[in-house]
Image: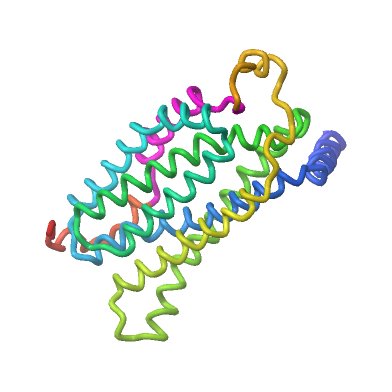
Amino acid sequence: MIRSIVAEFQEHQRRTRAFSRNARLMLVALGFLGVGQGAFTTLFTLSIVELGYSEDVLGLLIGLATLGGVATAVPAGLLCDRIGARRGLLIGTVVTALGVFIECTVTAAWLLLAGGLIAASGVTLLTVAQAPDLATSSAEEERAHLFSVAAALLVTVSIAGSLFAGSFPVVLKTLWPAMPLATAYRATLLVAGVVSAACCLSPCCATRRGSQPLPEAVQRSWSARAAPPCGGSWGLASCWHWAVGWSFHPSTSTLPASSGSVPARLA
């Protein structure tokens, strides 16, 4: 049994070292995005509460973002079918960065709602396009290893993003003691979100399109399409991601115990 485990581990290492250039670049891009995701899920609710909003407004922000993600999931899949997963990743990264920028620079509730909807649409497009692009960046025999490395990487860098989100506001408050805590939180989210998205664009742009073929059956069924398939099924999977994932979203458990006394401010 031990020999079998060792042999499997060695095979995994061999497959990992043999990843294509595209696959390695995509892992770098996902790593940058994971840092921003970890920071956002840790600090977003605290930043909203520090702005003076109540849990009702916070629930509205998260709920509408979830509905926006569900509503755009299937259209995002169809869009990726038409333009390709790589372009879908690039557009999703830009749209997500725009939504995060709005959320971190405005205070009016309706603008926060708009930013949340934009960011949710971008995240949905990223979710839909990620798996097909990884598939086309790898050979069939290394695909399972690539997906496992990508999943482990996202968890690891999300932890790093959470650590950054917890420590960077302290650094800002130490350098500028008069800075409001809400400003420190929002500056941290802005740095983590926009910078990670910007760093993600370079690896995505550097990859070569379609370096590895998809299975022959899939190619035959999509022979008339100009772009590799990725849409409908991944759009439905993204619907499930939004509907279920946010029920256990880490940010919903980060509210301070005293937040119930914070008055709502909808202006």
Q: Residue at x 37, y 85 (%)?
A: 176
Which portion, as a residue range, is magenta? 227-250
| Left or right placement of residue 12 versus residue 256 in this view | right
Quadrant showing the N terminus: top right
Q: Is residue 79 located in the magenta-colored stretch of the structure?
A: no
Most foreground residue, 231 or 166 = 231
Is 140 above or below relative to 50? above
Which quadrant would residue 67 be assigned to in this image? top left
Q: Position of residue 220 (x, y in %)?
A: 67, 14
Q: Kindly tell me whether residue 71 is visible in this rendering.
A: yes
Q: Residue at x 47, y 44 (%)?
A: 92
Q: Position of residue 163 (x, y in %)?
A: 50, 65
| Left or right placement of residue 33 versus residue 74 in this view | right
Quadrant showing the C terminus: bottom left
| Left or right placement of residue 111 versus residue 121 in this view | left
Q: Kindly tell me whether residue 264 is visible in this rendering.
A: no
